[in-house]
Image: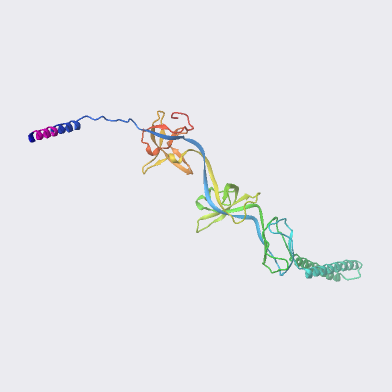
Amino acid sequence: MIKKILVLILILMTAGGLYYIGQRHKPTAVFNPGPRVVAVVVAPVISDIFTDKIEALGTSRANESVDLTATTTGKIARINFTDGMTVKKGRILVELQSDEERANLRSAIANAEQLKRDLTRIEGLVKARTLPTARLEDQRTLYKKARAELQVAQSRLRDRRIVAPFDGQLGLRRVSTGALVTPGTVITTLDDLSVIKLDFTVPEGFLATLKAGQTIHARSDAYPKFTFTGKVSQIGSRVDPVSRAVTVRAIIPNDNRKLLPGMLLRVSLIKNQSRSIMIPEEALITTARKKYVFLLQKNNHVRQQTVVIGRRRPGAIEILKGLKIGQRIVTEGTLKLQDNSKVVLQKADNAANGES
């Protein structure tokens, strides 16, 4: 009985070994998926205007600006303006107490008038040979002196008034009626905001390209969606020896009064404009040895095309050599591509089908 069991086990082991050897040497099926197809997005090579810009930071200034101050010591009698008022040139803004100056002026006027009458009477007597000519010259001298004293009295009275020297907008009032002011005391400010002067610095390397009349665009954080446009009015006569930059002044119309003196603006100065071949920035592939794009062929294959690039701007690159207007290049899916890869267009582009 034991012998039969041993024989049966030996037979099973032999059969199992033969089955294993047969399975190892059995031919296996080979799966060939075929050539790989990559989904891509393409865009046409276009011709566009390329504008060189110089970026800088500038500070706005009023066309005319002044701190209105007293020129003499005295108490304020009247204030004839309110904060932020728009005034015309010559408007009397503040009057100081001037009783003494008015009295002196009246006295000077009376004295000058009396001496003028005396001069007229003496001229008649000299013609009649009643008085000597020397008496006439003495009277003329007295009259001239009286006129000078009258002008001094008028000037002292004018000093008791603070007037607007030009059209503009007043700032905040800094004094009150009855306050004692002295020479140099700031009463308020006056700014001509009809236009704004924008001063900014440009590196000396751009000096040869600067000229009066160039267009500038400026933006402020206060109005992020608004662009202010102006013209270069003057280029500084000196280059700063430390920063190696020259100061440029531009004039910006300010009809809407959005700009105020002292604001910080980001300035874009248009250097020159030219038409160039442009491609989307994401289409360019850069390696240590070359720069290239994947150019779409009419059989829906792509090939590497070496290019020479020029200037850049946000989202686009200028192509100097290697591409023609109307050709289509891959903008999305480039990481999966190799030379001569087959592609399928994921989105329709703006160019005609097939290679240009």
Classify residue 309 as left or right of residue 194: left
Classify residue 115 as left or right of residue 11: right
Classify residue 8 as left or right of residue 201: left
Colour scheme employed for the rendering of this structure: rainbow
Q: Position of residue 23 (x, y in %)?
A: 20, 31
Compared with 311, 245 (above or below) is below
Identify the image quadrant of residue 140: bottom right
The number of callouts visible is 0
- Magenta: main secondary structure: helix
Classify residue 283 as left or right of residue 212: left
Query: Closer to the camera, 169 or 35?
Result: 35
Compared with 167, 275 (above or below) is above
Identify the image quadrant of residue 338: top left
Q: Quadrant of the N terminus?
A: top left
Identify the image quadrant of residue 172: bottom right
Q: Quadrant of the C terminus?
A: top left
Query: Closer to the camera, 132 or 200?
Result: 200
Q: Please identify the residue farthest to the front as the structure is shown.
A: 1
Magenta segment, which residues?
A: 4-13
Residue beneath the point at 50% across and 51% down: 205
Q: Position of residue 3 (x, y in %)?
A: 7, 34
Q: Position of residue 54 (x, y in %)?
A: 52, 48
Query: Closer to the camera, 219 or 10?
Result: 10
Query: Closer to the camera, 249 or 67?
Result: 67
Compared with 102, 226 (above or below) is above
Is 124 magenta? The answer is no
Q: Position of residue 157 (x, y in %)?
A: 76, 66
